[in-house]
Amino acid sequence: MGSKKKTLREKYENRPCMELSKHFADISSGAIQVPRTDILPDQEFLSQGDDIKEYCNVYKRNMAPFYKHYCASIPFVFEEQCRIGMALLRMARRLPDEQVLTFYETDSQDGTSARTLAELASGKVITLTNGLHTVNKKNFEELCRHPFSYFYLGYFCDITPQLIRTLPNSNVFADGFDVIYDNATSQFYDKDRLEQ
C-alpha cells in the first residue's frame, strides 16, 4: 500500500524553501540584497503613453524592499508587472459603474502589484494578496494608500471560501475572483513538476 498523498498545505509547510524563510524575510525587510541603484523601467516601454508612465511611477512608489529586489533581479519584470496591471486597469474601467473587478495575486509578498492596480482603479478593482512574513504585512499596511486592497498573512493554499468569509469586506470576494494571478514560484514549493 502506498503512502498517503500530502495535502497542498502539508507540502507547503514542508517545502524545500522553508530553510530560506529567514533569508526571504531579510530581503523583505531590506536587511540584505538591496539594489545599489534606482529601479527604472525601460525608456522604450515608457514611450507607449502617459498612462504607462503614470502606472510605472505609482508602481515604483509602492515598492517595498522585496519588490525592489525582485525588479532589480529579473530583467523586464518591472515592465511585465506594469503591462499586466495596465491591461487589467483598462478592463476594469470598461465595466458598468456598479461592477468591480476582483483580483487575487498569490504569494506577492507585500502586494506591490495588487496595491498599485487597486489604487489607480479608485475602487473599480478590489484586491487580495498574501505573504508569508510579518514584514510583508507591515510593508503592505504602511504602503497601502487606499481601502481597496486586502492582505492575508499565510499560504496561498489557505485562501478558501471559508477563510474569505472571515476577511474584512468579505462579501466582495464571496463569488471568488474575476482574476487570479499566480505569482508563486513553484520550484520553491515542490520538485514535482508534473503535479504542478
Image (cartoon, rainbow, N blue to C red):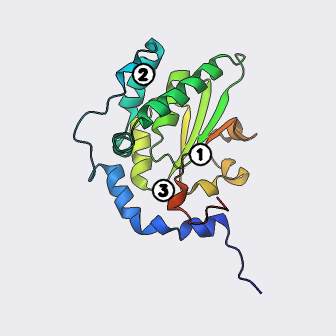
The residue at the point 41 percent across, 63 percent down is: 21
Q: Nearer the viewer, mark 2 or mark 3?
A: 2
Report whether 4 appears left or right of 64: right
Rate crowding at label 1 as few (under 14), some (14 to 19) or many (20 or more) other CA atoms within 10 Å.
Answer: few
The amino acid on which the numbered mark 2 sits, given as a three-letter code, is Phe
Of pointers 2 and 1, the one earlier in the residue sequence: 2
Q: In front here: 82 or 22?
A: 82
Q: Distance between the residues labelled 3 and 1?
A: 15 Å
Judged from the image, the secondary structure of the residue bearing numbered disc 3 is loop
Q: Where is residue 5 in the image (x, y as percent from the top left)?
A: 70, 74
- Amino acid type at mark 3: Leu
Count of labels in the image: 3
Q: Are marks 3 and 1 in contact (CB under 8 Å)?
A: no
Give the residue at the far top of this rendering. Answer: 50
Viewer-nearest residue: 191 or 93: 191
Q: Which residue is drawn at 26% across and 33% down?
A: 38
Q: What element carries label 1?
A: loop
Instruction: Confirm whether residue 118 shows in the render.
Output: no
Q: Callout 1, which amino acid? A: Asp
Q: Residue at x 35, y 21 (%)?
A: 43
Question: Which residue was labeled with disc 2?
Answer: 45
Q: 103 and 138: which one is in front?
A: 103
Per the image, the residue denoted by label 3 is: 132
Looking at the rendering, in which quadrant would you find the C terminus?
A: bottom right
Tell me if mark 2 has few (under 14), some (14-19) or many (20+) residues whose alpha carbon lies within 10 angstroms of its own.
some
Residue 171 at what x, y percent from top left? 71, 38
- Do the residues bearing badges 2 and 3 touch, measured as CB atoms within 8 Å? no
Residue 182: mark in rendering: 1
Asked if one can make out residue 148 in the rendered structure from this viewpoint, the answer is yes
Q: Nearer the viewer, mark 2 or mark 1?
A: 2
